[in-house]
Amino acid sequence: MNVLIVHAHHEPASFNSALKNKAFGLFTSKGDVVQVSDLYKMNFKAVSDASDFKELSNPNYLKYQAEQTNASKDMLFSDDIAAEMEKLLWADLIIFNFPLWWFSVPAILKGWVDRVFAMGFAYGGGKGVYDTGVFKGKKGMLCITTGGPEATYLEGGRNGNIDKILFHINHGMLYFTGMDVMPPFIAYSVARLTDDERKGILEKYENYLINLNTVKPITF
């Protein structure tokens, strides 16, 4: 199996990075091939602009989605975008590994989605969405850490139901492009946990990934 981990955390020694490392180690030990896009380490450009294209169809007025569609025809994307697109096409499983920030993804990861899930490549330009999406047959999942405890993310909790919080990511990014969306793995309030508790979460994550093929995707 080909596994792509898109990792968005500044600190290599963080627990979030430990989750990324756990997945990498597990899959490689099984003989799977793993690529990691460590966005902060790569200094990945999050802001979309005209430099995302090697040529512009209209150099006088930047209509970004139109340029994405145009670039998709002859792969006129900048090298950093093209490299991530190749990883997406190659991968059977894509894991998005990040801390929950302001009830969403960190800016660098949102920029990755904006630039890499390009119109004409991941959707649009005659390509389908949802059940007929470009990435149909691929699995996508979120592995996230939170600052707040689990109780605050339950229905009626002060932060709101975690499934509703993640809907715009699971539905609007992963399922929109055709992926089978696996239930997220969530490590709650890791800064407040003991070392033994963190070790237990890593073991739980390993077990989740080992049995991933038996887990049913989310239905929308």
Image (cartoon, rainbow, N blue to C red):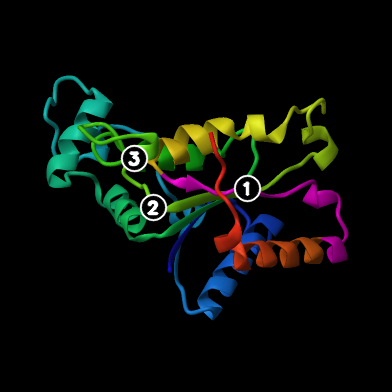
What kind of element bears circle 2?
Answer: loop
Cα separation between marks 2 and 3 = 9 Å
Q: Percent from the top left, x then y, of residue 122? A: 31, 40
**Residue 184 on the magenta segment:** yes
Percent x, y of residue 185: 66, 51
Q: Nearer the viewer, mark 2 or mark 1?
A: 2
**Numbered-mark total:** 3
- The residue located at (79%, 33%) in the rendering is 154
Q: Nearer the viewer, residue 208 or 41?
A: 208
**Marks 2 and 1, how far apart at CA:** 18 Å
Quadrant showing the N terminus: bottom left
Question: On the image, which quarter does residue 17 sit in?
Answer: bottom right
Span of residues in magenta: 179-197
Q: Residue at x 46, y 41 (%)?
A: 174
Local SS, label 3: loop
Above or below, 162 relative to 139: above
Left or right of 55 on screen, residue 77? right
Q: Which residue is mark 3?
A: 133
- Of mark 1 and mark 3, the one earlier in the sequence is 3
Kindly tell me whether residue 103 is visible in this rendering.
no
Residue 104 makes an appearance in the image: yes
Write down the residue under mark 1: 184
Of the residues shown, which amino acid type is indicated by label 1? Pro
Between 149 and 218, the one lying in front of the other is: 218
- Between marks 1 and 3, how big is the CA–CA gap? 20 Å
Q: Amino acid at mark 2?
A: Gly
* Residue hosting label 2: 137
- What crowding class fits label 2: few (fewer than 14 Cα within 10 Å), some (14-19), or many (20 or more)? some
